[in-house]
Every structure is written in C-alpha cells, then in structure tokens.
Image: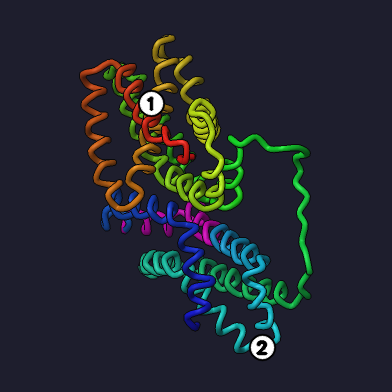
C-alpha cells in the first residue's frame, strides 16, 4: 500500500469513526480492566449464543466499511482510482487487502486476543466459524469494490431527494449525522439511553433524591461531546459560507436550539416518559431543560476551545456542574449555561 492509498482510504475512514473509537477506548480501556476482558473471552466461548455477537458484529463493521469506501469512490475526487480495476486481480487484491487490514486492524487484533480463550476451551467449531466469517467479509469487500470500479464512469449523478421542498435548517446537521456518522449516532444514543435507564432504576429504590437524576443528566450530556465536535466541524466546513450572511441573534439561538433538540430527541423523550411515571411535575420539567442547557454550554465550550484545551475545561465544567447540582437549584446553573452559550454566538459572523 503506497502513501496515496493510505491517505485516500485509511485516514478518512478512521477520521469518520473518531467518535466511535473514542467511546470504545473509554469503555474498553478505562471502564474495563484486562481481567474483565479475559472473563468476557471465556464467557463468549462457553456460550455459543453470546459468541454469535462476534461474527455478526464483524460483518456489521465490514458492511459499514464497504459502504463508506463505495461512497467516497463515487465522488469526483476519487475518479482517479477507477483505472485500478484494469490491473491484474493479484495486484489489485494485494493493494486492497492491505487497505482492509489497516482499517480492520483494531477489531481483528481484539478477535485474535479473544481467540486464545477459544483455544483453551477447544472450541474449534466456533473459532473456524469466526475466522471464516472474517475472511469472507474481507474477500467479498474486495470483490464488490473491484466490481464497482469496473463500471464506466457517469458524467453526472443526480440523486433526487425523497423530501420535496426546502428542508428546515435545523434538520441539516441531524440528516448529515445520520448519513455520514451512523455508528457514532447509534452508539451515542444507545449508551445514553442505557445510562439514563440505570439512573432511573437506582432512583426507584428510594435511596436517592432528584439530584441523583440530575447527575445522570450531567453524565448523559457529556456523552454528547463527540456529536458536538462533529457539529462544530460540520459548521466550519460544509456551512462555512453562511458566515457571510449574518443573521439576528434570536434566529441563530432558535436554530441552534432546534438542532440540538432534534439530536437529543431520544434522550428527551426518555426523560419525559420516565419522569412522568416515576417523579413529580417538577422533575418532569427540570430534567429535559437541564439537559438542553448543559449541552448548550458544552457546545459553547467546543466553539471557544476547539483544540485539545477543550478537554481541560471540559473536566473542570463537569466537576463544577457536579458541585452546583449538590448545593444549588438546577434553574440557576441552567440559566448561566444558556447565557454562556448566548455570549459565545453573539458575534454576527458566528453561526
């Protein structure tokens, strides 16, 4: 694999999955120790039904990778690579095998680690099934990519949107996130709902007051950081030219608020349903509003500190918000968070 192929097919793929790998590193490297990974490996090879998650998960990952590569190969910048379909299959397959192994390296390495426990359990059938699936996924990916590159180029490709009419501006980021970062979106929403459900289950025991639920909302808000960083990148790249069209402050505030409410819709719906079942009207109103204000403050922090310094201030904000939850009613920090966001976007050239 040469330098051009690495920059064209490997770096963009890992960049698109940056949020996914950050969450995987947090859960797999911080919340889980080596001992827990060992117990997980032994458990999977002792229970074939649970083991089926591994081949199906790899197929899902390989399918997303194939979809990603086919999408970028359709773009005008990648038409240069269409001549590679004329190369002998031996050369073409060797090149794309290195690309696929680079993009699947982390997952294949983890499967190899888990396979040691399959050898201990003499689970030869499960091991053979797992690695045959891996080889099949890689082989069919190379085959489909070559078939795609073998087709003649079209002079123009027009995709008619299903929606007839202008899309509201608040939907642009959500639709872009669903199209370009589906794994990040699904993983973030799934983990957020799982975490919220855990806080509500422990709250039902009666050992905690409403501040426990507010702390859960605080944790869920920080789970949205990869999405907020993606929103910042979306606005600075695909919507950059809108900076030349300054708008009134009220319109910008409503646009940001509508966009974030749309992205946070699963969490807000969960809070409304669970809050109505288990708590009073005050908690039913406070939790969604507190979540929105926290996310607005985090978005303002991303705008103000787009580099590595964001994480330093992010940690400070987390512990500061935790102390505010303990000693101050939620309405006061919520108002402060909204004001902080408003000050950040007050410039007419800030989206």
Secondary structure, mark 2, is loop
Q: Give the range drawn in magenta.
A: 38-59
Residue 104 visible in the picture? yes
Quick check: 219 above or below 124? above
Secondary structure, mark 1, is helix
Quick check: 274 above or below 186? above
* Spatial separation of the CA atoms under disc 2 and disc 1: 58 Å
- Left or right, 92 with respect to 196, comes to right
Q: What mark, if any, has residue 144 been given in the picture?
A: none
The one nearer the camera, 14 or 114, is: 14
Residue 182 visible in the picture? no
Which residue: 33% across, 24% down?
214
Does 156 lie within the magenta span? no
Q: Do the residues labelled 2 and 1 touch (CB within 8 Å)?
A: no
Q: Which percent across, then down, holds residue 79?
A: 67, 74
- Left or right, 207 with respect to 96, comes to left
Which residue: 47% across, 36% down?
348
Quick check: 179 above or below 87? above
Which residue: 54% across, 51% down?
181
Pointer 2 residue:
87
Tell which circle, 2 or 1, labels the residue nearer the N-terminal end. Answer: 2
Q: Nearer the viewer, mark 2 or mark 1?
A: 1
Pointer 1 residue:
338
The one nearer the camera, 250 or 221, is: 250
Dominant secondary structure (helix, strand or loop) of the stretch shown in magenta: helix
Q: Which percent across, then down, holds residue 112?
A: 40, 69
Q: Which percent across, then down, holds residue 83?
A: 68, 82
Place residue 41 in its image quadrant.
bottom left
Does 57 lie within the magenta span? yes
| Mark 2 crowd level (few <14, some 14–19, many ≥20, 10 Å Cα) | few
Q: Which percent across, then down, holds residue 267?
A: 48, 30
| Mark 1 crowd level (few <14, some 14–19, many ≥20, 10 Å Cα) | some
């Amino acid at each position: 694999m040469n330098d051009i192929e690495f920059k064209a097919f490997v770096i963009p793929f890992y960049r698109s999955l940056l949020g996914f790998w950050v969450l995987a590193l947090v859960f797999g490297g911080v919340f889980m120790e080596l001992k827990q990974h060992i117990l997980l490996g032994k458990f999977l090879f002792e229970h074939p039904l649970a083991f089926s998650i591994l081949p199906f998960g790899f197929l899902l990952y390989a399918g997303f990778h194939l979809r990603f590569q086919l999408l970028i190969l359709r773009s005008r910048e990648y038409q240069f690579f269409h001549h590679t379909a004329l190369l002998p299959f031996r050369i073409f397959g060797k090149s794309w095998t290195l690309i696929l192994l680079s993009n699947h390296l982390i997952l294949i390495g983890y499967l190899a680690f888990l396979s040691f426990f399959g050898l201990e359990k003499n689970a030869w059938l499960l091991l053979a099934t797992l690695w045959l699936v891996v080889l099949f996924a890689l082989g069919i990916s190379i085959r489909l990519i070559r078939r795609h590159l073998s087709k003649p180029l079209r002079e123009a490709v027009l995709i008619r949107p299903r929606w007839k009419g202008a899309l509201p501006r608040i939907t642009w980021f959500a639709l872009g996130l669903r199209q370009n970062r589906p794994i990040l979106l699904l993983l973030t929403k799934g983990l957020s709902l799982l975490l919220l459900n855990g806080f509500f289950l422990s709250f039902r025991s009666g050992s905690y007051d409403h501040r426990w639920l507010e702390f859960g909302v605080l944790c869920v808000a920080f789970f949205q950081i990869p999405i907020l960083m993606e929103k910042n990148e979306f606005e600075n790249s695909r919507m950059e030219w809108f900076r030349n069209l300054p708008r009134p402050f009220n319109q910008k505030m409503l646009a940001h608020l509508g966009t974030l409410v749309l992205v946070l819709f699963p969490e807000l719906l969960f809070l409304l349903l669970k809050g109505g079942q288990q708590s009073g009207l005050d908690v039913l109103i406070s939790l969604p509003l507190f979540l929105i204000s926290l996310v607005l403050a985090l978005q303002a922090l991303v705008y103000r500190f787009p580099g590595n310094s964001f994480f330093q201030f992010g940690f400070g904000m987390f512990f500061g918000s935790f102390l505010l939850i303990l000693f101050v009613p939620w309405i006061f920090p919520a108002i402060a968070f909204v004001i902080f966001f408003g000050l950040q976007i007050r410039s007419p050239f800030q989206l």
